[in-house]
Amino acid sequence: MDPTRLMLRLYFGPLMFGPGKADLLAAIEETGSISAAGRKMGMSYKRAWSLVEAMNAGFAEPLVHSARGGAHGGGAGLTEAGRQVLAAYRRLIARIEEAGAAEIAAIGGLVPRDISEGK
């Protein structure tokens, strides 16, 4: 397994969007629940909600919609803006990986083998 990975964080003033928030959005879309998405990622309910609140407040439109539990159950999902942000971020990562493959390999070639093998 190649241990090389690319992580990109975008900063828009005080708003940061990166791999953790992207993964949380994807998990919310998959599970239909903020708490289930947090559990899947190994984070607390409070942390997951905090990240969702930050994203919803930081973008022009909310990225996640939610409904409280009750007789009909709760749930959450991505808004159209949330799907657009997640898709654009994933496309950007793919483009950078493709365009930068030679540079990433060149840098990786200068990393000692025992470090890249996790030793």
Image: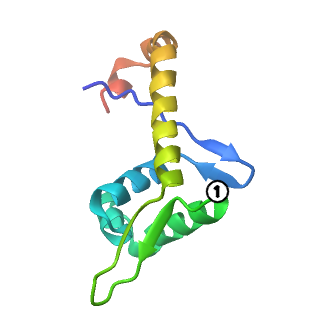
Type of amino acid at the residue the image marks with label 1? Phe
Asked if one can make out residue 35 in the rendered structure from this viewpoint, the answer is yes
Instruction: Specify the farthest residue to the bottom.
Output: 71
Instruction: Specify the farthest residue to the right.
Output: 13
Q: Quadrant of the N terminus?
A: top left
Residue for point 52% across, 12% down:
103
Examine the image and state in which quarter residue 105 appears.
Answer: top left
The color scheme shown is rainbow
Counting from the top left corner in percent of width and height, residue 50 is at: 52, 70
Viewer-closest of 71 and 31: 71
Counting from the top left corner in percent of width and height, residue 53 is at: 56, 69
Q: Quadrant of the C terminus?
A: top left
| 105 lies left or right of 58 | left
Counting from the top left corner in percent of width and height, residue 67 is at: 41, 77
Asked if one can make out residue 100 in the rendered structure from this viewpoint, the answer is no
Examine the image and state in which quarter residue 38 appears.
Answer: bottom left
Q: Is residue 3 above or below residue 77?
A: above
Other-residue count near label 1 (Cα within 10 Å), few / some / many at <14 / 14–19 / ≥20: some
Residue for point 30% across, 27% down:
117
Residue for point 31% across, 89% down:
70
Q: Is residue 17 above or below residue 105?
A: below
Q: Is residue 94 above or below residue 65?
A: above
Residue for point 41% across, 30% down:
5
Viewer-closest of 41 and 73: 73
Q: Is residue 49 above or below residue 79?
A: below
Secondary structure at numbered mark 1: loop
Counting from the top left corner in percent of width and height, residue 29 is at: 35, 56
Name the residue beneath numbered marker 1: 59
